[in-house]
Image (cartoon, rainbow, N blue to C red):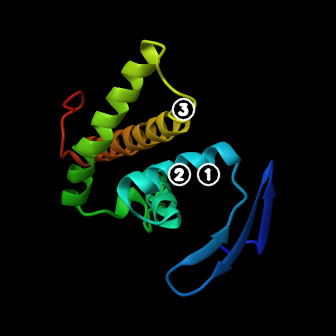
Amino acid sequence: MALPREIERGAGIAHVRRNQMQTQVTLRLPDRLYRSATRLAIGVQRPVRAVLTDVLLSALDAWDVQDEAIERWADQRVLSQCDAQMSPRQSERLSELLDRQQSGQLTVDEKPELWALMRVYEAGQLRKAEALAEAVRRGLRAPGNT
């Protein structure tokens, strides 16, 4: 699939340039989001670009496109995906943010993080459900045995 040279969407413009293993992207971020990234970068003593890359990897890694259909996976890979969970760090942070949201203490800067972690959780649950269905189809797991 060829990537467009320039993608315009809403307030942000992304310029895309690819090389062998990485794609360089230039984004226009809302000032508030950039300030949040800068504060995080200062806190972890890393460059802003590294923090943004880490956040994107964390948020989007669960949506990584599979190279092959689940039907072609080895049994062990299917079973491993059946039992997959969010990383403990992501799970703990998601719980913290949900608690803060419930108590009305979620900050404006935390809302995008909560959104991203919820997407990671949802994508993981979808993958898990697909793997469970495949495991049942293959007779690796009994129906209802999750």
Q: Which mark is residue 34?
A: 1
> Dividing the image into 4 quarters, which one contains the C terminus?
top left
**Can residue 86 be seen at all in this image of the molecule?**
no
**Residue type marked 3:** Lys
Which residue is rendered at x = 33% and y = 36% of the image? 93
Camera-near label (3 vs 1) is 1
Residue tagged 3:
111
**Residue type marked 2:** Ala
Residue 34 percent across, percent down from the top left: 61, 51
**Can residue 38 be seen at all in this image of the molecule?**
yes
Camera-near label (3 vs 2) is 2
Compute the Cα span from label 3 to label 2.
13 Å
Compute the Cα span from label 2 to label 1.
5 Å
Compute the Cα span from label 3 to label 1.
14 Å
Instruction: Please tell me how many numbered marks the rendered image carries.
Output: 3
Q: Which mark is residue 37?
A: 2
Residue 131 percent across, percent down from the top left: 32, 46
Q: Name the secondary structure under disc 1.
A: helix
**Residue type marked 1:** Tyr
7, above or below 131, in the image: below
38, above or below 128, in the image: below
- Does label 3 or label 2 sit earlier along the sequence? 2
